[in-house]
Image: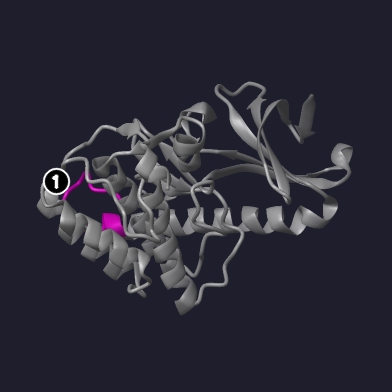
Amino acid sequence: MEIISGPNIYEVKELVAKSDRFRLYACTQKGVAGRRLLQIAATVEDNPLLQRSALHLKELEGKAYEIEEEFALVKEKPDDRLDYQLGIPELIDSFECLEQGRRVINILGFRNVEDISQVIPLANIAQKDKRRIDAKTSAWIMGKLLKLLVFAHGEGFTPETLDAGNILIEPVQHYVMIFNWARSDITPAKRREDISNAAKTVITAMGGNPRTGYLPDDGVENFAQYREILFRLASQEFTSAKNAHEAFYGVVYVIWPRKYHDFGVRPINQREEE
């Protein structure tokens, strides 16, 4: 099926995901390489959700590039970049489709990612692959989530959720993205909740249990310190993503050197499923 928006023609492919409020399909754009996402409102009544999400994505993108320009004037190393925009989907198009009952459609991509198949929800690792992320992988995912919250909270935005279905990763380039940005009602309580939920999601993705305190250590030296900071983050102790980010890396850099760590997964054992 083809969807037309002005000069753009989108070929709708397979269903990727769905919720009560919208459906996500893979799609291609005529004349453009790679595959993107077509997000369509489930009903006309859900149009405001997609319109709000589109607006927030454009605002976040603009803020990210504005902050990057400011950072370029003060950075000490020429190659240093903040790249906050890599943590949010790229809004390519947004329109009301008459042929689809006037439902709103958002066309989404991911910067520096040609094909959406390179990006996976964190939830898929456990639910589909029956695996868990290892400790080193959890560190870069947690760190990038906190970095993204520093940016979003600073601009008055908050994710719709921070569960494993709303957190996306590109394993090779180490991109960590939050998909749904339909909310902007940031409060002190929501800041604490976002930090806590991000940590709980990472703990669970490691095969741990945020409720019981269990966390497999993979034989990591000084793992007790790492476990402690993760559960401190999960406890809603931190009211500032910036402070949480600094505290987290104050521990991480003691345990692991600053270098690229491959994406790593391990089988889930029986205890981790309890």
Q: Tell me the magenta residue range.
A: 71-82
* SS majority, magenta: loop
Asked if residue 81 lies left or right of residue 18, the reply is left
Which quadrant: the N terminus?
top right
Which residue sits at x=35%, y=58%?
146
Q: Is residue 76 visible?
A: no
Asked if residue 40 lies left or right of residue 224, the reply is right
How many discs appear? 1
Amino acid beneath label 1: Trp
Residue highlighted by disc 1? 256
Which residue sits at x=42%, y=44%?
273
Asked if residue 264 lies left or right of residue 151, the reply is left
Determine if the magenta segment contains residue 98: no
Q: Nearer the viewer, residue 68 or 196?
A: 196
Q: Position of residue 101 (x, y in %)?
A: 89, 43
Q: Which picture quadrant has residue 251?
A: bottom left
Q: Which picture quadrant has residue 13?
A: top right
